[in-house]
Image (cartoon, rainbow, N blue to C red):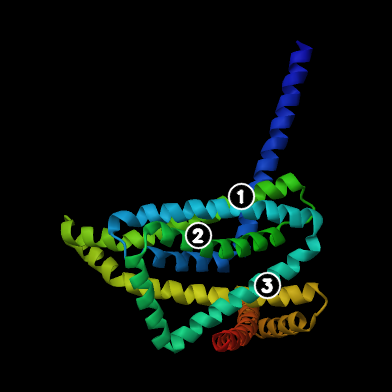
């Protein structure tokens, strides 16, 4: 009997350790996922355009196909690569993260440039609409999955860099896997809601039993263009802010402390001037200055890309 009790006690102890490990994995995954908010928001803002031009009954299947491709990107390709970096080349994480940050700055600046000069952007949208009509659904999904791979690489790298270095490889792997699933479900769940919101609004406006339901449906339909516009603005701002923050912190880790220290001093001084909201002011000033650096870098990269494109065209 005593042997059975001892066995049960050991099982209970193992169960407690396992439960603690699960809690640690989930906790670390959620905490690390929040660091990738900028790339996540951009992913959610970019994806709805891939269902443009298709009938309503194909929108959700297309979103599901892209979500499956995103999971494969994160778990099959990027997760093993992240573990190899963590185990054998942790020194490479900061430079790779900075490359991703520079890409975010470039993308954000390019979107802002198109917003300021909509003529070229409008021509690109018309071309995309023609392509949507001329090509098969599978090709659009493949294109979306390729774009997702770039954003997923940035998300996984940011998530990996946010995990404590003291974690074991199995816990890091589990945390990255959980984070990948959480982010994918959140992004493509939000995308599914966004792309079907207008259909739901139309149904409510046409078939609502009460006047308030019909008015709400009409409001949803009329409000969707503004929501999509807001998503683009938020996604662009998040990309520039997160990209600039990654660059500043990466330079700090590599020994170039001036940008980080300067921003920190300015933010602390601003917070001391407004002690009632010191925390909010310090965060806001830091975000604005990080974003200013990201925007400046982004415009430099856009200019360089234009020069390279012109040289290639002449060649």
**In terms of secondary structure, where does tag 1 sit?**
helix
What label sits on residue 99 in the rendered view? Answer: 3
CA neighbours of label 3 inside 10 A, class few (<14), some (14 to 19), many (20+): some
Place of residue 255 in the rendered image (x, y in percent of width and height, measured from the top left): 83, 76
Q: In which quarter of the image is the N terminus?
A: top right
Q: Can residue 286 be seen in this view?
A: yes
Residue matched to label 2: 145
In the drawing, what numbered circle is on residue 76?
1
**Secondary structure of residue under mark 2:** helix
Q: Residue furthest right?
A: 255
Residue at 76 percent of width and 56 percent of height: 86
224 over 70 or under it: above or below: below
Q: Is residue 52 visible?
A: no
Which residue extends farthest front?
A: 315
Q: Residue at x 46, y 68 (%)?
A: 46
Image: 95 above or below 264: above
């Amino acid at each position: 009997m005593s042997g059975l009790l001892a066995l049960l006690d050991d099982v209970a102890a193992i169960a407690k350790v396992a439960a603690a490990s699960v809690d640690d994995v989930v906790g670390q995954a959620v905490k690390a996922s929040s660091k990738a908010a900028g790339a996540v928001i951009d992913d959610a803002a970019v994806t709805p355009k891939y269902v443009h031009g298709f009938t309503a009954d194909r929108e959700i299947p297309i979103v599901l196909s892209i979500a499956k491709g995103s999971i494969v990107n994160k778990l099959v390709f990027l997760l093993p690569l992240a573990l190899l970096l963590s185990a054998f080349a942790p020194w490479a994480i900061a430079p790779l993260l900075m490359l991703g940050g520079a890409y975010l700055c470039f993308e954000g600046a390019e979107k802002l440039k198109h917003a300021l000069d909509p003529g070229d952007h409008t021509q690109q949208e018309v071309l995309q609409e023609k392509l949507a009509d001329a090509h098969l659904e599978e090709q659009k999904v493949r294109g979306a999955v390729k774009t997702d791979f770039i954003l997923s690489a940035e998300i996984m790298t940011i998530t990996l860099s946010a995990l404590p270095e003291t974690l074991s490889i199995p816990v890091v792997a589990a945390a990255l896997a959980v984070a990948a699933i959480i982010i994918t479900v959140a992004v493509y769940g939000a995308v599914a809601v966004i792309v079907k919101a207008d259909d739901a609004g139309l149904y409510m406006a046409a078939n609502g039993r009460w006047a308030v339901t019909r008015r709400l449906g009409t409001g949803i339909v009329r409000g969707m263009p503004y929501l999509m516009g807001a998503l683009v603005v938020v996604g662009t701002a998040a990309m520039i802010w997160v990209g600039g923050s990654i660059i500043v912190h990466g330079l700090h880790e590599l020994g170039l402390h001036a940008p980080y220290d300067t921003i920190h001093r300015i933010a602390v001084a601003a917070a001391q001037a407004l002690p009632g909201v010191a925390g909010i002011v310090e965060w806001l000033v830091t975000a604005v200055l990080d974003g200013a650096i990201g925007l400046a870098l982004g415009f430099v990269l856009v200019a360089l890309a234009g020069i390279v494109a012109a040289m290639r065209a002449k060649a």
